[in-house]
Image (cartoon, rainbow, N blue to C red):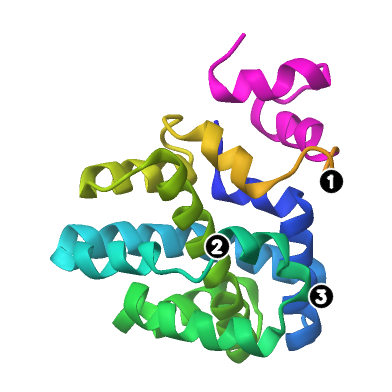
Amino acid sequence: MASILDILNTNLGKELINKASNKTGVSSNNVSSVLGMVLPLILGNFKNKIQEGYSEALNEMLEEAPNPFKFMTVFSQKETKELLQCGHDYGEMILGENFSSVINTISDSLNVDKEAVREITTISIPVVIAILSIQKKKENINKDKDIEDLIDSALGSSSKYNNSFFDTIFNIKNDPNFIPEASEMVIGKKKKKDSILKGYTGGK
């Protein structure tokens, strides 16, 4: 089953880790650990905000995300400063009053500087928004419940939108090693490349 953490095994994820590491001075391994905690929290808070009645604003955020398809394609060329600004704006809405507590919890758990955790989190938020925005467009999703289902898929608790998730986070031609790596995480063994993706997305 797909999960937002699968992104860490893609070229996009490696580029995200590299940008965050260069900006904060935190090792790539520690950045990866921070992302392993914060990415699900971003999604969880997004879902909570929908349930709290902020669905219209959040839906608008996904609809108006500036060219998410291009964002994913040229992510490696994005300036970290731009990602921080964008992530700050999104983070205020998604994490809101929980932002500081999320940062403090992760910082204390991993023994990573709080400001570094804040910057890593902020840089990662636009990536999450771009993924959800692209999936929303691909799946033609408009209802709150369907957006919640989309988030559940990204959290690994549903396989409903696995196809569009994998289509979004990696390009097989550019990232051929993702599939076997992910298969080992999910099912604990290697399979042939031509069958692994089908196993994820409900095929045979």
Lateral position of residue 167 relative to residue 27, left or right: left
**Residue drawn at (53%, 38%), measured in percent from left and top?**
164
Q: Residue furthest top?
A: 204
**Residue 100 sits in which quadrant?**
bottom left
Task: Name above or below for residue 111 compared with residue 169.
Answer: below
Q: Amino acid at mark 1?
A: Asn
Q: Which residue is mark 3?
A: 27
Q: Which residue is mark 1?
A: 174
**Residue drawn at (30%, 83%), measured in percent from left and top?**
97
Spatial CA span between label 1 and label 2: 18 Å
Q: Which residue is mark 2?
A: 68
Residue extent of the magenta highlight: 177-204
Q: Amino acid at mark 2?
A: Pro
Q: Position of residue 94 (x, y in %)?
A: 35, 72
Q: Which badge, 1 or 2, comes first in the chain's sequence? A: 2
Q: Amino acid at mark 3?
A: Ser
Task: Name above or below for residue 202 compared with residue 115.
Answer: above
Most foreground residue, 165 or 73: 73
Q: Residues within 10 Å of mark 3 (few under 14, many from 20)?
A: some
